[in-house]
Image (tube, grey):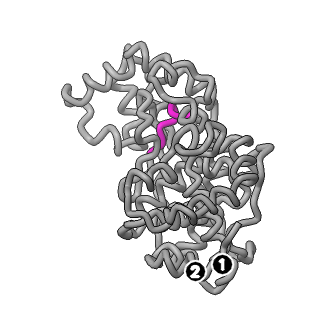
């Protein structure tokens, strides 16, 4: 399931016996495709044909005008028709995506055997980019129209910045799905008071991506360009020295923390060529080094460990 990229691919991530991973097949149910392919001249009967597979969306009483009428308006909306056609052009099938998710969820099940694998659906969201992947109990829903590629003109018409649009591609689906699983099923919601707390928290998520997506380039996991990967590799010593000299690791100032953690075109306070989220990147390296030093520590134990200071100290990380 190798995702092609010219970017740096790190050997980070837990070392495991791959033969112990049991294949967990993933099937994607394409609600958006089924709905927009329905013949609107015979809409009720067309919807009946897909009701069983998509009862999650359609319910059990589609004859009710309060349900059918909005659905009809939805599939006859000119913008949504245009978006659905683009989705079908980019995704005539989801064979590659099913393969990638099968690989990722097989590894996820290895690391977290007590967690359920959700049923997976896709739909046309009308460009609902704020929540491209939704996890609700045993169901996961992907808005395929949020992954049409960075050249899709409607994204810019929404006023989205380039750094956001750059990550709205095919390659990001499996990453966003596994990030959504982390947020919904694994994230312990520890209190994060200092920049170091938030760095380690972000680092845990990225290390988890190392575990479930080992063949995905680092640049895709953290959504960096090649230049941004190169910048942080070349400037990590200076960034580290800046944090030490200004005693920022233990800063409780949320605004200062956010400059190093939140996404953007670059990190405020550094050059416009700098990598964004450099605190998250450094937290990632700290967690990797900590886990290298503690191979007996399970991924779940790492995630549940709320002692960022101990992880930091025992990592021994320094660029």
- Is residue 300 at least partly visible in the picture? yes
In the image, residue 3 sits, relative to residue 247, either above or below, namely above
Which of the labelled discs sits on residue 14, or is there none? none
> Contact (CB < 8 A) between labels 1 and 2?
yes
Q: Which residue is mark 2?
A: 313
Q: Which residues are magenta?
A: 141-147
Q: Can you give x and y, in whole percent of width and height, for residue 162 in the image?
A: 57, 30
Secondary structure of the residue carrying numbered label 2? helix
Residue furthest bottom in the image: 296
Is residue 201 shown to the viewer in this render?
A: no
Please tell me in which quadrant of the rendered image residue 136 appears. bottom left
Please indicate whether residue 240 sits to the left or right of residue 257 in the image.
right
**Quarter of the image containing the C terminus?**
bottom right
* Local crowd size for mark 1, using a 10 Å CA cut-off: few (<14), some (14–19), many (≥20): few
Residue at x 56%, y 69% (from the top left corner) = 109
Residue 268: image location, x then y, percent:
52, 43
Residue depicted at x 51% and y 52%: 260
């Amino acid at each position: 399931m190798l995702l092609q990229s010219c970017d740096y691919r790190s050997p980070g991530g837990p070392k495991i016996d791959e033969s112990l991973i049991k294949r967990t097949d993933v099937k994607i149910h394409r609600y958006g495709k089924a709905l927009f392919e329905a013949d609107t001249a015979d809409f009720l009967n067309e919807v009946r044909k897909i009701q069983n597979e998509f009862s999650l969306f359609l319910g059990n009483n589609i004859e009710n005008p309060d349900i059918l009428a909005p659905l009809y308006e939805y599939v006859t909306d000119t913008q949504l028709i245009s978006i659905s056609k683009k989705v079908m052009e980019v995704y005539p099938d989801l064979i590659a995506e099913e393969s990638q998710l099968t690989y990722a969820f097989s590894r996820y099940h290895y690391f977290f055997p007590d967690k359920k694998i959700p049923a997976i659906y896709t739909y046309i969201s009308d460009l609902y980019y704020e929540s491209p992947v939704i996890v609700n109990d045993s169901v996961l829903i992907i808005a395929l129209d949020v992954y049409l590629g960075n050249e899709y003109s409607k994204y810019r018409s929404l006023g989205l910045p380039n750094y956001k649009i750059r990550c709205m591609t095919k390659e990001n689906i499996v990453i966003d799905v596994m990030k959504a699983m982390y947020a919904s099923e694994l994230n312990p919601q520890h209190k994060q008071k200092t920049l170091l707390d938030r760095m380690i928290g972000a680092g845990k998520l990225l290390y988890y991506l190392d575990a479930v997506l080992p063949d995905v380039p680092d640049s895709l996991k953290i959504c960096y360009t090649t230049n941004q990967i190169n910048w942080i590799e070349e400037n990590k010593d200076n960034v580290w020295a800046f944090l030490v000299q200004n005693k920022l690791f233990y800063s409780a100032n949320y605004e200062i923390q956010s400059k190093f953690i939140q996404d953007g075109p670059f990190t405020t306070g550094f050059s416009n060529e700098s990598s964004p989220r450099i605190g998250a990147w450094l937290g990632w390296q700290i967690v990797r080094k900590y886990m290298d030093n503690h191979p007996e520590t399970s991924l779940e134990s790492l995630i549940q460990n709320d002692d960022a200071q101990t992880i930091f100290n025992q990592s021994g990380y320094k660029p």
